[in-house]
Amino acid sequence: MMKIGVPKEVREGETRVALIPQTVMELKKMEFEILIEKGAGEKALFSDEDYKKAGATIVDDAKKLYQEADLVLKVQPPQKHPKAKKHELELMKEGSTLVGFLSPWTNRDLVEQMQARKITAFAMELIPRITRAQSMDALSSMATVAGYKAVLIAADTVQKFFPLLMTAAGTIPPANVLVIGAGVAGLQAIATAKRLGARVEAFDVRPSVKEQIESLGAKFIEMELPEDVETKDGYAKEVSEDFIRRELEAIGSRLPRMDVVISTAQVFGKKAPVLITEEMVKTMKPGSVIVDLAAEQGGNCELTEAGKVVTKHGVTIYGPVNLPAQLPVDASQMYARNITNFVKHIFQAENRTLDFEDEITKNACVCHNGEIVSETIKSLFGGSSS
């Protein structure tokens, strides 16, 4: 019987867990044995007793779990384990399988370590955005959490009401919110800001999202779009310098009247584009707020500092990292559902063999048997597979 191991996350600030009791029960029905490290779900409010009732075995320490597990499910990429004093990859059995967020395009050393230990690694970020993979799309799930939380951070910081209020003391106008980037995080930010009563405008280089933006009650910022700005998978891609200049003009013209800016623009696998320069920040009203969800990729705002809150030219700029960890209960439920559906997919064969002819399995696989499988990662590493 294949054993699935879920270790306690060791990255500082990480509160999520890869499986919840409900998904443990689902995988037990597929005749997997589930090992959960003691305390793995505590920060997401799932107790060891909850996991036991679901049929999991609680393992006292990480070393034992890694030595026994054939398949390891994680949230964060493997790193040095503070208690075991070894890298998590060193604790894994050679030839075992790993599934989680792996950030392979920014961590070549990690990929090489996985290759050396012949670990079959699947990155949740690489699951293709196709219809039959929607239930496995953890990037979208976590972006939903981040977009929602970003608006709450802004609403808590900006020194005025979000909604229009009619009071005996007069009419209070609504806050003006600009959302840059209308992917999943941006659309959730739009929806949340509108629910709170703000007046919302949104900008995105992809014309295909205009209808989605307007359906949420926001105003779409029009701009001439002469280029192909979207990949076949629906991701924004890099554009020319002239296009970026016009993009900055479109955004910059609106900043002086904005109370809040939620910035979410990212290019898959690359540094985030700078869309708010320091000069543009200077034009904003004192007390306004920027929440930059691209902080971990370098930031959309020139003044963003990842993991910090700074005030520059009277504007408060948030550079949050790992926002989903601030809502661990629901974030864990969503992620556990995604990863469980993915495990069911890749191991649906009775003999648990992997089908690399399948688009989802192949695209999500970083490496197998010492070779890089993902064409995306091969291209980023210059075509090298070993």
Image (tube, grey):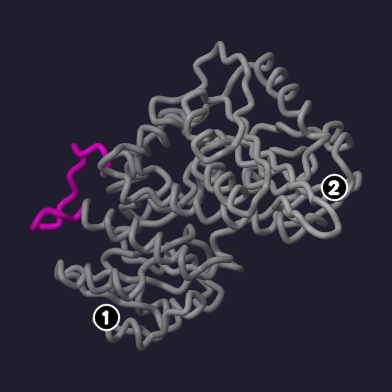
Question: In the image, residue 49 lies at what x, y percent?
Answer: 35, 88
- For image coordinates 85% across by 38% down, the residue present is 284
Given residues 264 and 65, the one toward you in this image is 264
The residue carrying pointer 1 sits among few (fewer than 14), some (14 to 19) or many (20 or more) residues within 10 Å by Cα, namely some
Toward the bottom, the furthest residue is: 49
Toward the front, the furthest residue is: 168
Using the image, determine if residue 7 lies above or below residue 54. above
Given residues 50 and 207, the one toward you in this image is 207
* Side (left or right) of 187 relative to 156: left
The residue carrying pointer 2 sits among few (fewer than 14), some (14 to 19) or many (20 or more) residues within 10 Å by Cα, namely many
Given residues 25 and 372, the one toward you in this image is 25
Residue 298 visible? The answer is no
* Side (left or right) of 362 relative to 382: left
Q: Which mark is residue 315?
A: 2
Q: Amino acid at mark 1?
A: Ala
Q: Which quadrant of the structure image shows residue 347?
A: bottom left
Residue labelled with disc 1: 54
Given residues 225 and 237, the one toward you in this image is 225
Q: How far separated are the C-alphas under marks 1 and 2?
A: 49 Å
- For image coordinates 36% across by 69% down, the residue present is 19
* Side (left or right) of 28 relative to 9: left
**Magenta span main SS:** loop
Indicate which disc, 1 or 2, sits on the residue closer to the N terminus: 1
Toward the top, the furthest residue is: 226
Question: In the image, residue 274 lies at what x, y percent?
Answer: 71, 33
Q: Which quadrant of the structure image shows residue 313?
A: top right
The residue stretch that appears in magenta: 346-360
Question: In the image, residue 208 lies at what x, y percent?
Answer: 47, 25
Q: Amino acid at mark 2?
A: Val
Q: Which quadrant of the structure image shows residue 60?
A: bottom left
Q: Secondary structure at mark 2?
A: strand
